[in-house]
Image (cartoon, rainbow, N blue to C red):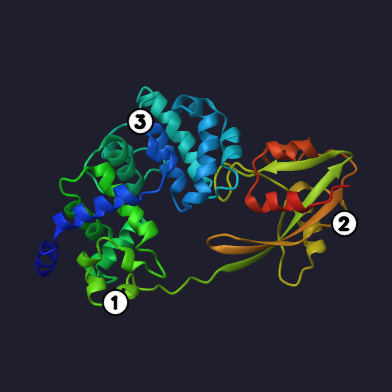
Amino acid sequence: MRKKAKYKSFQSSRFRKSLLKWYQAQKRDLPWRKTKDPYKILISEIMLQQTQVDTVIPYYKAWMKKFNTIKKLAMASLDDVLMLWEGLGYYSRARNLHLTAKEIVKNYNGKIPGYYEDLLHLPGIGTYTAGAIASIAFNEPVPAIDANVKRVLTRLFCLSPSSSNDKTFWELAVNLLGSAPPSEFNQAMMEIGALICIAKNLRCPSCPIRSCCKAYSKGMQARYPAIQKPKKVEEIEVVLGIIFNNDMVYIQKRPPQGLFAGLWEFPGGKVEPGESPEKALHRELKEELGEKVRIISNGKSICHNYTRFKVLLHPFICSARKRFSPGPGKGESRWISREELKNHAFPAANRKIIRTLRFP
């Protein structure tokens, strides 16, 4: 009961007025804000998951040139979809987006459902994305609660870690939304979290809602949200074999499930403790392909950081006496020209390797 009374005293009307006035004056000029097309909003929201706006913009524009309708996306091959997504990361988003397009064309006559509950049933669409699409494209009065909005709510109400749960965030966001235009309000909440109420070096003097912020009134805004101890990042050492036979190079496709599913790669694997990279490469290629190759030269080793691990890659230019095939049940593989490498979607680390290699 004390929690409800505490939140009830919040001046929601004044908050909404100040927030929306600021948003109209300060919002960024973003391509997906120039449309109410549900498909374009869907694409932008999927791309924006865990990815910064500046990174997304060129991908969004390129996507709309190639797949400007949901039917075109549904008819495309997964390889084409992943190729256009290459470098954007979190590739499960692209695979789920492809599945979503197929499902919408099949079950919704090519029209994106306009209700939050229906959107939740589509592949890869969770509560935030469903709320964003439903509110921005269809003006359904539901919250869109991303990491930025959670940070704003945590500071506005001085939420403790025990109170910072999905149910609390949802209830607070619903109360704040009130009768405001859902599309404008939700975008304003995300925008102020992205531009003003940021994680570090807060910009409180420029904040239009600071008079409503309980953390600011106590001078404790930097303490919210509570700082979590960073998780230890696993370090992995990997070898890759860039195997040539004359002018053709061998590539293989990763399984349809798991890490980097459906992307192309060079064969290789982890270096075992006490093992040299050269020995690891010969062992991995023998286990994986059943083939022996000759190492011609070492490529430049590179580091690549992922969210949960960091990898050190050792590439080796290799020569094979014949164009082999791993055989049935080993997945898809191809021998392609060097020029064709740009037409296949690789994980970001593999693409880095391609850019730095000096081919024979």
Relative vertical location of residue 256 with respect to residue 189 in this rendering, above or below: above
Q: Is residue 312 left or right of residue 183?
A: right
Relative vertical location of residue 324 with respect to residue 294 in this rendering, above or below: above
Q: Which mark is residue 220?
A: 1
* Amino acid under disc 1: Met
Kindly report the distance in space between the C-alpha atoms of the residues bearing marks 2 and 3: 52 Å
* Amino acid under disc 2: Ser
Kindly report the distance in space between the C-alpha atoms of the residues bearing marks 3 and 1: 43 Å
Relative vertical location of residue 303 with respect to residue 263 in this rendering, above or below: below
Q: Position of residue 309 (x, y in %)?
A: 57, 63
Provide the residue designation for mark 2.
297
Provide the residue designation for mark 3.
112
Instruction: Decide if residue 86 is in sight here.
Output: yes
The residue that appears at 66% across and 54% down in the rendered structure is: 349
Viewer-nearest residue: 39 or 291: 39
Viewer-nearest of discs 2 and 3: 3
Kindly report the distance in space between the C-alpha atoms of the residues bearing marks 2 and 1: 57 Å
Viewer-nearest of discs 3 and 1: 1
The residue that appears at 31% across and 31% down in the rendered structure is: 113
Instruction: Decide if residue 171 is in sight here.
Output: no
- Marks 2/3 in contact by CB < 8 Å: the verdict is no
Say what secondary structure mark 1 lies in: loop
* Amino acid under disc 3: Ile
Q: Is residue 315 left or right of residue 156?
A: right
